[in-house]
Amino acid sequence: MSQETTDDLPALWTHEPHIHLAFKPGDSVAAIDTNATPGFKGSKRDAPDLLLERAERFAELQEMLYANSLAGDNRKVLLVLQGMDTSGKGGIVKHVVGAGNPQGIQYANFGKPTEEELAHDFLWRVEARLPTSGHVGVFDRSHYEDVLIVRVHDLVAPEIWSTRYDTINDFEKRIALDGTTIVKVAMFVSLDEQKKRLSERLDRPDKYWKYNPADVDERLLWPRYQEAYQAMLERTSTDVAPWHVIPCDRKWYARLAVTELLIEALEGLDLSWPPADFDIEAEKTRLASA
Ligand code: AMP
Ligand code: MG
């Protein structure tokens, strides 16, 4: 365990969350306790204040990354969010990433591919949305849909989707070498909790927009999705881009956990505020008489 990054970790965590959440060979998707709060000693009552405080820390580091890019730093961070409907991807985008400075955030959502996208290799549309220097990019779904929904629904032949795991690993290795820190988060809710969240969407006019009748069909395919998620985690958890498995029945836990993963990634970059590239004293004098 690296000690340097634990210094600022709030006392409510027993260890850096990535230690509890990293996918390990042998871990089983079917066995995930989606209601658990691994590594967190606090309770739901502690969550709002802690999230506020840690989201602020995330925002500070994120702005620092952006500021450094103006001084030539090429580094960037990519948060990949994968999860079934209602797992809380939107909440992470809104409450965690949303705490950042929009100037340095690049958001991309990947839905059903367009005709044009389908005419290209599956990574084409993904390449086009990769975060540029200084940015925190968020993928709300990602290239992993091409080994998840595509596999479950036989949208391409097995000979094709089965080659994609290696293709994805090569791709992620390449972008990591190009200065991208990759944070991959797989979000899991129980079927019961999903039913609750879907029925809430049907009961509340402010949530209709999130409801998609097709979500009910996907729900029925959960065993096949489990298989596809298992293969994804086993085959694409690499040194440069490990997967984290987040239990998401408690939204407050998922948000706190992802915030810590982002902070850890950013702290790993050893950022500081870039020095002024002008003569501060001379500028003060000039300004005083301007
Ligand atoms: P949402 O994230 O709720 O906007 O839903 C987007 C939908 O697009 C989900 O059902 C995804 O599974 C689907 N989708 C995303 N990528 C692909 C893909 N490559 N092929 C087919 N469907 C996809
Ligand atoms: Mg949806």
Image (cartoon, rainbow, N blue to C red):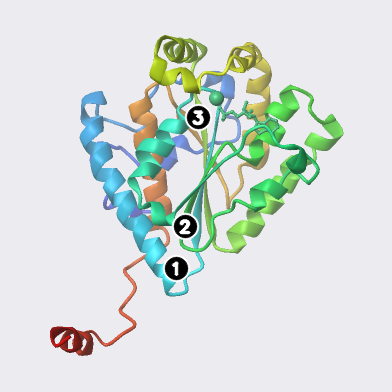
Please state if 156 lies on the left or on the right of 90 as rendered: right
- Name the residue tied to disc 2: 135
Asked whether the viewer can see residue 270, the reply is no
Residue 143 x/y as whole percent: 66, 41
Residue 92 figure quarter: top left
First in sequence: mark 2 or mark 3? Answer: 2
Q: Which mark is residue 187?
A: 3
Q: Residues within 10 Å of mark 3 (few under 14, many from 20)?
A: many
Asked whether the viewer can see residue 171, the reply is yes
Q: Are marks 1 and 2 in contact (CB under 8 Å)?
A: yes
- Name the residue tied to disc 1: 69
Residue situated furthest left in the rendering: 288
Please state if 64 lies on the left or on the right of 105 as rendered: left
Q: Are marks 3 and 1 in contact (CB under 8 Å)?
A: no
Q: Cα distance, mark 1 to mark 2?
A: 8 Å
Q: Mark 2 is on which residue type?
A: His
Identified at 35% across, 37% down, the residue is: 95
Residue 69 figure quarter: bottom left
| Quarter of the rendered image showing ligand 2 | top right
Residue 34 figure quarter: top left
Residue 104 x/y as whole percent: 42, 56
Residue 51 x/y as whole percent: 28, 38
Q: Mark 3 is on which residue type?
A: Met
